[in-house]
Amino acid sequence: MTRILLIDDDPMILQLLKLFLENEGYHVDVAEGGMQGIEAAAGHQLPDLVILDLIMPVMDGFETCRRLREFGVQTILVISNRRDERSVVRALELGADAYLYKPFELPVLLAKIRTLLRRSGRPTPIECKVYDDGNLVIDLNKRRVEARGKLVQLTATEFRLLSILMHNVGRVVPHEELIREVWGTGKDSGLTSLKLYIHYLRRKIEKQPKKPYYLLAEWGIGYRLREPETASQFTS
């Protein structure tokens, strides 16, 4: 799943963008400030895209951008209230791939993200595939799930969990990976939450939730989504 790191000193902006991008199918981490952003990028798998504000205390966006490049981050989108040519040029020279003025419309931000990810060769949610075996349909592009001809209403967390399993269809996804992708790190009750949401999903999409056909457990390891019987049932 495509990973995006948001770096801004405004928690309200971070919360808004995180919710919006997660609803679009991205894995999103947030950092309140440049130093936290550097630590987040260095501490785990490098993000596929960083969205970075310029005006921040302690370490501003310019220095953060430069250091992110040193760590190997490939794609950086700067968002800022600064509209002067000097700031734009400096950000681009320090490694930013694009510059977006605040305030901006969320669809514009999403279009910019998709463009940058295409240029870098990273997959975007719009390129996801559709699972359809005649009984279960999962269309990630349309955010639509049907079970035995009936529309299934999923919460954001349920849909996120199902989309991760679909991206890895046929492969056992370890508990730790699912917890990290859905809830992030440092969640003490992660395994309990994971089991609970698998239970919720089974109740909604399985014909016999106690004898699941689609959401299969590999005890002590993780979960997997059963592959369709033919390749034509899993299409782009």
Image: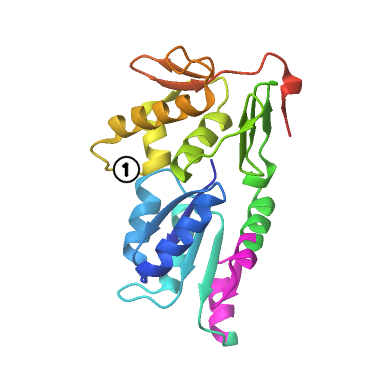
Front-lying residue, 2 or 136? 136
Which residue is painted at 50% across and 63% down in the image?
Answer: 51
Amino acid tagged 1? Thr
Q: Quadrant of residue 37?
A: bottom left
Q: Secondary structure at mark 1?
A: loop
Answer whether residue 201 is magenta in the image.
Answer: no
The spot of residue 65 in percent (x, y) is 46, 66
Question: Quick check: 134 left or right of 48?
Answer: right
The residue under label 1 is: 185
- Extreme-front residue of the structure: 150
Q: Is residue 127 visible?
A: yes
* Residue toward you, 127 or 83: 127
Query: In the rendered view, does 187 fall on the left or right side of 10?
Result: left
* Whole-percent x, y for residue 66 in the image: 46, 66
**Furthest residue toward bottom:** 84
* Residue lying at the far right of the rendered structure: 232
Q: Residue at x 76, y 22 (%)?
A: 232
Q: Is residue 1 left or right of residue 30?
A: right
Q: Is residue 7 visible?
A: no
Location of the C terminus by quadrant is top right
> The magenta stretch spans which residues?
86-110
Task: Name which residue lies at 47% across and 35% down.
Answer: 161
Q: Position of residue 165 (x, y in %)?
A: 52, 29
Q: 232 and 5: which one is in front?
A: 232
* Image spot of residue 17 (x, y percent): 48, 62
Closest to the observer, 228 or 143: 143
